[in-house]
Amino acid sequence: MDTYKFIENHELVLNVFGRWPGFHDGEVHKIILDRTSQLPDGGCYPSVELYVRGWNMVADISDDSLYRLKNDSLVHFLFEHVSELELDGLNHQNVISGLDFSLVHDAGEAVPVLAVEINHCYGLSGGFKALRASVISVVPLG
């Protein structure tokens, strides 16, 4: 199984980009850490919302000698029941070399969890694990 298929509503990303992007040279615009997501019994669990800019790069060059970006969009992810969160380096731009997803089995767990790795280029980096993930929206930029 392609790992991105673990993410609910992944079709929203495929519909815009025509493929699952690696988010190379994309940007983390916003990250929200929330410990107040509610369980039915009233308990709480941690979640992470991640807003990442992505696009398809095409070979066409603009008048100012930059590659044109096709489908430039902001992808809003929600990760629930988060554990092992480590983040570093938040700054004014947060360019990433990639956003990697893998399914892992924690010791003693029958259900796989999604491992998320934010590979930095300039600024934010880190990773975490989540029991559940979804795409909330994909909004065009520009």
Image (spheres, rainbow, N blue to C red):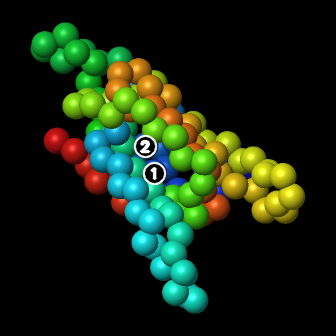
Q: In the orientation shown, which residue stands out farthest toward the left?
A: 63
Q: Is 27 situated left or right of 82 in this image?
A: left
Please state if 122 lies on the left or on the right of 38 as rendered.
left
Numbered disc 1: secondary structure: helix
Q: Is residue 142 something one can see in this rendering?
A: yes
x then y, percent, for residue 72: 29, 39
Residue at x 46%, y 38% (from the top left corner): 87
Q: Is residue 73 left or right of residue 132?
A: left
Label 1 crowd (10 A; few <14 / some 14-19 / many >=20): many
Name which quarter of the figure residue 94 lies in.
top left
Q: What is the secondary structure assignment of the residue under circle 2?
A: helix
Report the disc number at residue 74. none
- Image quadrant for the C terminus? top left
Mark 2 and mark 1 in contact? Answer it, CB < 8 Å.
yes
The answer to whether residue 56 shows anywhere in this view is no
| Residue lying farthest to the bottom in this orientation | 41
Asked whether 127 or 20 is in front, the reply is: 127
Q: What residue type is labelled 2?
A: Phe
In the displayed structure, 135 sits above or below 44; it is: above
Cα gap from disc 2 to disc 1, whole angstroms: 6 Å
Extreme residue toward the top, this view: 65
Other-residue count near label 2 (Cα within 10 Å), few / some / many at <14 / 14–19 / ≥20: some
Residue 101 relative to residue 109: left or right: left
Please name the residue that numbered disc 2 is placed on: 17
Q: Which residue is drawn at 57% across and 89% down?
A: 41
Q: Position of residue 14 (x, y in %)?
A: 49, 50
What's the residue at 82%, 60% (across, down)?
Answer: 109
Which one is nearer the viewer's eye here, 63 or 23? 23
Residue holding disc 1: 13
In this figure, what is the number of numbered marks? Answer: 2
Q: Which residue type does callout 1 highlight? A: Val
Quadrant hosting residue 93: top left
